[in-house]
Amino acid sequence: MRRFFTGLLIFSLCLLTWGAFADEAPPKPAKLVVSTWGFNLDLIRKNIAEPFQEKYGIEIVYDLGNNAARLARLVANKDNPVVDVVHFTRAYAYRAIQEGLLQPYNPDNIPSLAELYEWARDPLGDHYAVGYAVQHLALAYRPDKITPPVTSWKDFWRDDVAGYITLPDMNTTYGPSVLIMCARAWGGSEEDLEPGWEKLAELMPRLTTIYRRSSEAITLFQQEEVWLAPIPSFAWGRLTAAAEAAGFPVEQVIPAEGLVGELSVVAVVKGSPNAYWAEKYIDFILSREVQTAEALDLVDSPVNRYVELPPEIGAKLTYGKEIIDALIFFDQAFIAQHLDEWIARWNEIRTQ
């Protein structure tokens, strides 16, 4: 009997020892390669790269470029990935999933997920990506030029704004959303887009131009060629600064149909030898501290529900109950499936 209990004790100790090794983190790499945009890189280094290295002893090395260029590099290195973690818009993350470039994250290794809005935790399904920053598309207008006030997407069809309006091109982040919102405004839906197409065809001759970058829309406001336009929240600060410098008022409207929401997402690259530490990086940028720091510097709007911002900062971001409750997120798989068809039809009605 004594031998039995001695053997049982030894076996139990072996199990505990094995469990400790099983839970032990893998060796730290010297660096993590993070693929992202180059905007505000000095602030991102301050708020993310430097404190992450201080906490974990791992250097962050950036692979920079726009969505398309960075996706192309991931494809080129698919069999021997050199990037560990990637930042994309939802549309490009969806394409990366289709190309077999991303791997699901382990939720147990990202405890900060519990603090996020539900819609940010798994926006593409199957744990392929996490939303870490949120934006919205509001309507910006000149209240000194347009009365009564703008309240709806339907206001683009008012006679008093004809010749002073612009829309984003279909082949942009928010182009497809404009089509869907126009359909919703005129009795259609995401599944029934014909009312939107009919009204956009009617609107085309009334447009000043079509813009491809938010900076172009801001310039049109500065030159007083545009009084009304859909403007993404990340450009709102630049628009208000330009309006103040030029001496005219501009207001942001939550239209009656709701606000188009969009997410910047982050994911682990398939085949990365540092997947565990890539997930630690994701957990780090979702933390309350980092999300607050990025918001205070106006880099990104937070998806962590517990971030608290002063009113003057929150007003410049996608933040606060009124805006968050108004957000609408469209299905990126549906958009990707139909985008080529929509671009062709958009170009057709532009030239009619």
Image: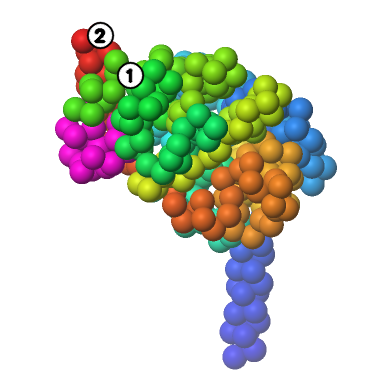
Kind of element beneath mark 1: helix
- Residue position for label 2: 351
At x 50%, y 16%, the residue is 225
> How many residues crowd around disc 2 within 10 Å: few (fewer than 14), some, or many (20 or more)?
few
Is-magenta flag for residue 208? no
Residue carrying label 1: 206
Q: Quadrant of residue 236?
A: top right
Kind of residue at badge 2: Thr
Q: Which residues are magenta?
A: 179-197
Residue 107 rendering spot, x and y as whole percentages: 52, 55
Can residue 65 be spotted in the picture?
A: no
Q: Left or right: 246 with respect to 269?
A: right
- Mark 2: secondary structure: loop
Q: Determine crowd level at label 1: few under 14, some 14-19, many 20+ residues with C-alpha closer than 10 A.
A: some
The residue drawn where x is 69% and y is 38% is 298
The residue furthest top is 351
Query: Which of label 1 and label 2 is nearer to you?
Result: 1
